[in-house]
Amino acid sequence: MNMPIGKKKLVMVLMIMIVLVFSNSLCLAEDKPADNMDILRDKIQADKKLLVAENMQLTEAEAKAFWPVYADYQNELFLLQSRSIKLIKDFAGAYQKMTDSDAKKLLDEYLTIEGLRLKVRQAYLPKFRKVLSEKKVARYYQLENKIHAVLAYELGKEIPLVNVSK
């Protein structure tokens, strides 16, 4: 790999994202103020932006055009992340007494979220192509894919498989 992305920095950002996911679920359960979650979310977004900035090698002109598109894209992804957090919370609530109906609803919602994630990525591709070269667009999508893959892996390690023996 010839991408200068720092492995330690990537893992740190992703671990903070995981903490956000699980902390958000706990905060919702305990009715804590959302202020702390907003601060943590802002910190994660800033760290992710820094990680992207360090790895994109943007010129000043490219940066001026790229960052507004990036911000809009991240806002749309945030909506999907919020929906994913709700899905994880719903799974946790149904896990002990999962019915076939619960499993169907959860799986359908998961596939809907993944379909929407793909649609957002496709919708933003022409926008990124307007402001960056094809190689830089590909690099940016690689960064997003790596971040998403590591987060999905870490979440996958923590979320148990559906119990089918009951």
Image (cartoon, helix red, strand yellow):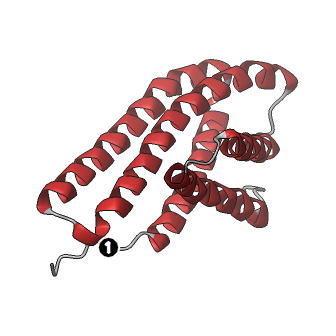
x%, y% of residue 86?
42, 47
| Residue at position x 45%, y 67% in the image | 156
**Residue at point 63% right, 60% down?**
19
Name, please, the residue furthest toward the bottom: 165
Nearest the viewer among 158 and 132 is 158
Q: Nearer the viewer, residue 127 or 20?
A: 20
Badge 1 is on which residue? 161
Left or right of 116, for residue 70? right
- Residue 141 as seen in the image, left or right of residue 10: left
> Foreground residue, 13 or 29?
29
Where residue 2 sits, quadrant-wise, is bottom right
Q: Is residue 74 above or below residue 102?
A: above
Total marks drawn?
A: 1
Q: Nearer the viewer, residue 46 or 41?
A: 41
Q: Is residue 103 above or below residue 120?
A: below
- Amino acid tagged 1: Leu
Q: Residue 10: image x %, image y %? A: 71, 59
From the image, which quarter does the C terminus lie in?
bottom left
Horizontal side of 71 relative to 114 (left or right) equals right
**Image quadrant in which the N terminus is located:** bottom right
Q: Where residue 138 sits: x, y (%)?
A: 59, 40
Relative height, residue 135 to residue 100 (above, below):
above
Q: Is residue 1 visible?
A: no
Q: Position of residue 59 (x, y in %)?
A: 84, 28
